Every structure is written in structure tokens, then in C-alpha cells.
Image (cartoon, helix red, strand yellow):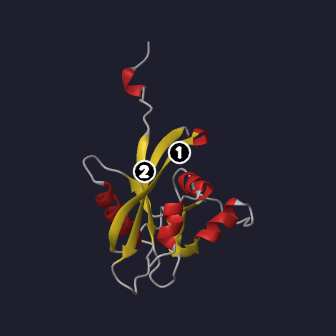
Amino acid sequence: LIMMSTIQAKNVRVGVGVLVKDPNAKGRFFAGIRKGSHGAGSLSLPGGHLEMMESWEECARREVEEETGLEISDINHIYITNDPMPLEDKHYVTIFMSAKCTSPLAEPENLEPDKCEGWESFAWSDLQAILAGERDDLSLFGPLKNIVEQSPECVLHFLNTE
């Protein structure tokens, strides 16, 4: 006899990742190394799960503020990836949002040290080098790896404009 309470339905989850421009370095954005959950040890953007009845923009604003303390504006959908993670027995669809810091002097704080090692500023070429295996010390979290592999023109345009 199978106990119904022990059976968990497998569902695709919705994640939101946010490309937050570094206001102090043209073409750069913030990312940090994950801790304590799937993808631990890999580089990821600020973000998290889309909550019930929440807009993508609300989720982006909430997650960035919770994780980095940054206030963001000009929040827009920029890309979507399909992210099966068979080793973790998970599957996500990740909605990538673009955003700017409201303050020109803004710097991220690590407000969730149990979930992130800290925030640093990266260029797209840094992520391409990590993807190419040029850095032994870093790997990319699944959704970030997928967007870097796909290298969509809209993301490159966002990062290279004011």
C-alpha cells in the first residue's frame, strides 16, 4: 500500500534571475556563488522563486532587495531559459529580468550569507571564460550557464547600453 502523503508531485518550477547593472562599471552586473541549496558552489544572479500571484517585476524587485539590499528600477523581461536539472531531480523555467540600480553609488550587500558567499561585479566575457573552463575556481549555475551558452543579442545589447 502506498501512502499518499509520501508521494510528492513533480512540477516544473518558475525561477526569476535578475541582471542588475553595476552602476559603477559599464557593461558589468552582479552575481554571487550559491550556498546551501541546489547549484551550491556555482555562480548565479540574484533571484529566486516566483510566488503565487506575483508579477515578474515584483519578484525581481523583492528578490534583489532581499538578497543584495539594492533598490532597482527599469525592470524588464529580457529572456527565458528551459532548465532541466536531472542530477538534482529538478526542472525550472527561468525568467531573466534586466534592471538598473536606483542609486548611482549602489553596492550590493550579502544579506543572505547562508545562501550566498557574496556579490561581485562581472562582465559577460568573464562568464564566457568560466563557461569555456578557463577558471578552475568557478562554474555557472544551470540557468546562468544556459543563458551564457545561448548568448542572446538582447542581453548583450542591455549590458552595452547606458
**Label 2 sits on residue:** 15
Q: How many marks?
A: 2
Residue 108 visible in the snapshot: yes
Other residues around mark 2 within 10 Å, as few (<14) / some (14–19) / many (≥20): many
Corner quadrant of residue 5? top left
Name the amino acid type tagged 1: Asp
**Picture layout, residue 95 above or below residue 99:** above
Name the amino acid type tagged 2: Gly
Q: Measuring from the top left, give residue 53's x and y in whole percent.
A: 24, 48
Q: Which residue is at 47% across, 76% downward? A: 161
Residue 69 visible in the snapshot: no
**Picture layout, residue 24 above or below residue 135:** below
Q: Measuring from the top left, give residue 148's x and y in whole percent.
A: 59, 59
**Picture layout, residue 83 above or below residue 135:** above
**With 71 as the anchor, is 29 left or right in this view?**
right
In the rendered view of the protein, which quadrant contains the N terminus?
top left
The secondary element bearing badge 2 is classed as: strand
Query: Nearer the N terminus, badge 2 or badge 1?
Result: 2
**Picture layout, residue 149 above or below residue 138:** above
Of residues 34 and 20, the one nearer the viewer is 20
Q: Are the residues at dot 2 and dot 1 in contact (C-beta closer than 8 Å)?
A: yes
Q: Measuring from the top left, give residue 78's x and y in whole percent.
A: 43, 59
In the rendered view of the protein, which quadrant contains the C terminus?
bottom left
Q: Which residue is at 47% across, 78% downward? A: 22
Taking the view exactly as shown, the residue that stands out farthest to the left is 53
Q: Measuring from the top left, give residue 116's x and y in whole percent.
A: 50, 65
**With 58 as the anchor, is 67 left or right in this view?**
right
Mark drawn on residue 4: none
**With 53 as the anchor, is 125 left or right in this view?**
right
Other residues around mark 1 within 10 Å, as few (<14) / some (14–19) / many (≥20): many
Mark drawn on residue 83: 1
The secondary element bearing badge 1 is classed as: strand
